[in-house]
Image: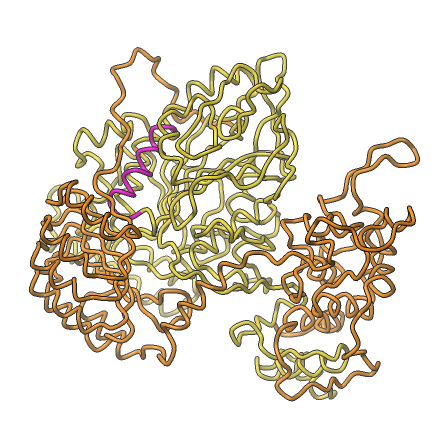
Chain colours: A orange, B yellow
């Protein structure tokens, strides 16, 4: 980008409102605003927010009804803004996310640049919301999206006021979506706490040992190490070569490599190892007994190994083990049942129920690869 | 906010000064700050486009097997049957292993695996034409004359590094050459096309009579001949071309070349997948490729545009899908790979609930179904609902960008990561799509 057209510069003003709703101003709370923003006073929905919606939004975004011409009208884009219930159910609850303007479609859609085709209100309808209006909406969402006593425009028109009983969202709070992702992200952060990014030299030494090390999620210092493509050259020595990175390794894929039972002892020095994949290696019961000392191991893939019942019994000592794959091993169903009884929370798979082969059919030969437009 | 900042930014100054400019401008006008930009990166060119930031998943899926049914699969006759409705036609519904979830009668094998899968019954789109709808399905953007967007597979490989340096990261089996693959991304992110899974990878072995030594000699001579050209033309395209060659040679020399050969599978496995048919063979190949660390494998099935004789043709087409997908889910689970492999079954739109005079159904983007399994997706109940006749989405609508955002989220691809095209326009993996994070356990 060599030049910013000035018109684009003015759109910059809209960006921070979306991006920064939850973050602190590192230099303190005093905005250098020309207009004194009512920073501390709560925004009142009925007197401040509702008029904005009525002027800019409601004409298209009200619940299905029959208009004065007798025509049936549906809410555009399936978004209803004329009632609390409508707002909460539209777009899977994402129209207004209490406390989070950056995640609220009401705010993000109204913040798009004037020439963006998804901008609300649409260009053919009118100009974008004024900065003041957008700021009011943003602050209202930031402050928790409180509707006060307001239920719906229809109720107002019919003169009904006061709280409606029944629905929880009658209380005026937008439903919070079940943000499971937050919890998972937190677990990862805990594990990564205090770790710095692996440096280039470390990664180079791993590459020399034929290891492919990728961050477990983008930008994480935790590593997922695989040996795909070099399995025939990888053995116990390569495992030892991973030790300089021992603090970083969370997942290790050793499928089809030449590691042995004895080599697995190296893994005991990896405190953050949570997922181990030993598919189609020569690991047996002795190796499984070594792994029993990995008290934090979550998943273990033993598909195609020589592990048997005594190895599986030893693995019962892994208190954190959530999943074990044991197909094409020497493990018997009885041993699996015994382990399930001991560890009801551990998910163990033996042979899957593959679809049975089709009976010799007299079905007509099907048309393959017939391209259709 | 000073004139200096304005000018600095206008000159396309460095990121730090842009950051200061935005920060000051924001403070001046809105009383809010521009601090805490996403991960410390501004992506300054985006200006005004809202960016969706979510905490990453704990265990993102590592691979994708994307099964695409081209032509617009009739949702009522497959994943979203409405038994008893007038629009259902002669197709009946069957119960599945997942409580409360029914499939059409054509999926008896898949019914047994439905505890692993989640049907999204509330897909909705405005794209009713094949080209446009398929384009959007692949890229999340509308087809335009000005640019070719990058497909999901290209994004996946660009953001998340390959696991296997000797194999391509992106493969498409039986697929369309006219759909964008790498788009405006460098060509190394394009999918390797495999015409037929049974034939595998063509031209991947040295010709008879050419020893490895001779082959190496030839390559070195070629490199010498190209040296001057590469030196005089250091453009990205030239480099990319050279890299493609290097990739191809690496593939030829790979120990994993056998991954492409499904003849190596035992007969029982081939029969379980129905590998005598293209689609079953494609699914089996996909499983082999992800076992060897290929990130994104697509398998395409054609023929779903059932404008006429919908019911007969559905009966013809579905057994291969039923068997291939069921075998794939069971097999991946048995190998302990289901948790890290996201399996997608998708089509570009659905088909009309009203049956026309040719016993056909026509294009219907307003409501259709797709399926997600593996990759940590919670199997069982449907997500989203259509009405009693399958005409309208009544709950939890999911647009095509939302669907792709869900896949991207599942893979740990940040939805706010922008990649800028040559023309200076920024793009994200799923445009403005919002992921259905509830699907992931």
User: Would you say residue B40 is visible in this rendering?
Assistant: yes
**Quarter of the rendering containing residue A71:** top right
Residue B147 or residue B289, whichever sits in front: B289
Q: Which residues are magenta?
A: B322-337
Which residue is the extreme one toward the front? A165
The structure residue drawn at horizontal position 25% and vertical position 24%, both measured from the top left corner, is A357
The structure residue drawn at horizontal position 13% and vertical position 49%, both measured from the top left corner, is A305
Q: Is residue B328 found inside the magenta-colored segment of the image? A: yes
Left or right of B14? Residue A31 is: right
Residue A55 or residue B101, whichever sits in front: B101
Q: Is residue B421 found inside the magenta-colored segment of the image? A: no
Q: How many marks?
A: 0
Horizontal and vertical percent position of residue B184: 50, 55
Horizontal and vertical percent position of residue B243: 33, 59
Type of secondary structure dominating the magenta stretch: helix
User: Would you say residue B246 is visible in this rendering?
Assistant: no
């Amino acid at each position: 980008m060599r030049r910013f057209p000035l018109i684009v510069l003015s759109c910059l003003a809209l960006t921070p409102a979306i991006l920064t709703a939850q973050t602190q101003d590192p230099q303190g709370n005093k905005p250098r605003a020309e207009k004194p923003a009512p920073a501390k006073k709560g925004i009142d929905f009925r007197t401040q927010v509702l008029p904005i919606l009525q002027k800019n939004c409601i004409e298209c975004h009200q619940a299905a009804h029959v208009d004065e011409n007798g025509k049936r009208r549906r809410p555009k884009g399936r978004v209803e803004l004329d009632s609390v219930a409508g707002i909460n159910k539209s777009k899977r609850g994402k129209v207004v996310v209490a406390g989070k303007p950056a995640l609220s479609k009401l705010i993000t859609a109204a913040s798009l640049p004037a020439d963006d085709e998804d901008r609300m209100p649409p260009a053919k309808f009118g100009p974008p919301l004024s900065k003041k209006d957008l700021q009011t909406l943003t602050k209202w969402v930031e402050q928790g999206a409180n509707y006060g006593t307001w239920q719906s425009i229809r109720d107002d028109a019919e003169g009904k006021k006061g709280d409606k009983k029944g629905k929880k969202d009658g209380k005026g709070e937008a439903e919070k979506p079940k943000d499971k992702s937050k919890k998972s992200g937190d677990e990862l952060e805990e594990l990564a706490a205090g770790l710095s990014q692996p440096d280039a030299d470390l990664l180079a030494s791993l590459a020399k040992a034929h290891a492919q090390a990728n961050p477990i999620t983008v930008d994480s210092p935790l590593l997922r190490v695989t040996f795909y493509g070099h399995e025939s050259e990888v053995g116990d020595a390569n495992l030892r070569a991973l030790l300089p990175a021992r603090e970083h390794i969370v997942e290790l894929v050793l499928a089809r490599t030449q590691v042995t039972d004895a080599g697995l002892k190296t893994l005991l020095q990896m405190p953050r190892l949570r997922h181990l994949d030993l598919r189609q290696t020569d690991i047996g019961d002795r190796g499984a007994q070594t792994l029993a000392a990995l008290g934090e191991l979550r998943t273990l893939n033993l598909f195609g190994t020589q592990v048997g019942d005594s190895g599986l019994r030893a693995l019962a000592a892994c208190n954190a083990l959530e999943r074990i794959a044991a197909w094409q091993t020497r493990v018997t169903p009885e041993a699996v049942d015994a382990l399930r009884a001991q560890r009801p929370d551990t998910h163990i798979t033996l042979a899957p129920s593959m679809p049975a082969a089709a009976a010799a059919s007299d079905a007509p030969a099907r048309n393959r690869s017939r391209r259709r437009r | 906010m000073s004139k200096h900042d304005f000018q600095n930014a206008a000159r396309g100054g460095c990121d730090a000064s842009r950051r200061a400019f935005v920060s000051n401008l924001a403070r001046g006008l809105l009383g809010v700050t521009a601090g805490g930009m996403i991960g410390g990166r501004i992506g300054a060119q985006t200006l005004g486009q809202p960016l969706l930031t979510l905490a990453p998943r704990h265990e993102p899926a590592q691979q994708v097997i994307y099964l695409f049914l081209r032509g617009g699969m009739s949702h009522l006759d497959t994943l979203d049957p409405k038994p008893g409705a007038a629009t259902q036609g002669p197709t009946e519904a069957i119960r599945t292993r997942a409580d409360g979830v029914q499939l059409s009668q054509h999926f008896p094998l898949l019914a047994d695996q439905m505890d692993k899968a989640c049907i999204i019954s509330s897909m909705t789109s405005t794209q009713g034409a094949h080209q446009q709808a398929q384009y959007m399905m692949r890229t999340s953007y509308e087809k335009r004359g000005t640019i070719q967007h990058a497909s999901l597979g290209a994004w996946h490989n660009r953001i998340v590094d390959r696991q296997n340096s000797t194999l391509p990261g992106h493969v498409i089996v039986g697929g369309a050459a006219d759909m964008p693959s790498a788009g405006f991304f460098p060509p190394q992110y394009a999918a390797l096309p495999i015409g037929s899974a049974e034939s595998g990878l063509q031209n991947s072995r040295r010709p008879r009579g050419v020893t490895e030594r001779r082959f190496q000699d030839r390559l070195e001579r070629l490199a010498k001949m190209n040296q001057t050209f590469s030196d005089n033309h250091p453009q990205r395209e030239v480099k990319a071309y050279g890299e493609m060659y290097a990739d191809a040679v690496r593939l030829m020399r790979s120990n994993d070349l056998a991954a492409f050969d499904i003849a190596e599978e035992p007969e029982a496995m081939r029969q379980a997948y129905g590998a005598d048919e293209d689609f079953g063979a494609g699914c089996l190949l996909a499983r082999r490729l992800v076992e060897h660390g290929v990130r994104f494998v697509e398998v395409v099935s054609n023929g779903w545009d059932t404008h006429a004789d919908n019911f007969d043709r559905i009966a013809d087409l579905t057994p291969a899908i039923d068997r291939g997908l069921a075998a794939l889910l069971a097999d991946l689970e048995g190998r302990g790979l289901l948790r890290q492999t996201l399996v997608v079954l998708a089509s570009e739109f659905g088909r009309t609930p009203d049956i026309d005079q040719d016993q056909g159904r026509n294009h219907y983007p307003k409501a259709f179904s797709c399926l997600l399994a593996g990759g940590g997706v919670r199997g069982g109940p449907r997500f989203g609902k259509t009405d009693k006749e399958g005409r309208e989405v009544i709950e939890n609508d999911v647009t095509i960008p939302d669907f792709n955002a869900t896949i991207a989220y599942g893979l740990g691809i940040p939805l706010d990561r922008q990649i800028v095209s040559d023309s200076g326009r920024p793009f994200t993996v799923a445009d403005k799509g919002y992921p259905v994070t509830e699907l992931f356990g």
